[in-house]
Image: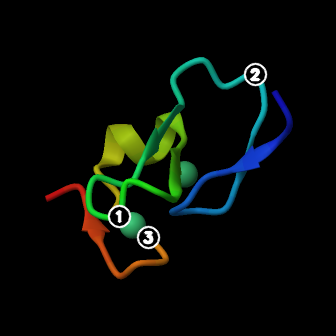
Amino acid sequence: MEGKNCSSCKRKIVNDKGSVIFKCPQCTDLEIVRCTECRANGVKYHCGCGFVGPN
Ligand SMILES: [Zn+2]
Ligand SMILES: [Zn+2]
């Protein structure tokens, strides 16, 4: 997998086993990337469609 950047902190996720990549629940089109740290801290993410999660 190529390097992707966390949608919240923009950190590049490489060898980050706790990271997740999933499709935006609203537009189901754009990919959301979350690193371990942002998941653990519940940091919000913003999709290009305007969706803000996790909520
Ligand atoms: Zn992050
Ligand atoms: Zn979206």
Precedes in sequence: disc 1 or disc 2: 2
View extreme (right): residue: 2
Label 3 beta carbon within 8 A of ligand 2:
yes
Disc 1 secondary structure class: loop
15 up-or-down from 14: above or below: above
Count residues near mark 3 (Cα–Cα under 10 Å), then give few for <14, some for 14-19, many for 20+: many
Q: Which residue is mark 3?
A: 47
Query: Which amino acid does the dot numbered 2 rest on?
Result: Asn
Query: Residue shown at 61%/53% (left/top)?
Result: 6
Residue 8 percent across, percent down from the top left: 51, 63
Tell me the mark number nearer the camera, choosing from 3 and 1.
Answer: 1
Alpha-carbon span between mark 2 and mark 3 = 23 Å
Q: Are marks 2 and 3 in contact (CB under 8 Å)?
A: no
Query: Which amino acid does the dot numbered 1 rest on?
Result: Cys
Q: Decide which of 22, 3 is in the foreground and name it.
A: 22
Q: Which residue is mark 2?
A: 15
Disc 3 secondary structure class: loop
Label 1 beta carbon within 8 A of ligand 2:
yes
Precedes in sequence: disc 3 or disc 1: 1
Residue 27's disc is 1
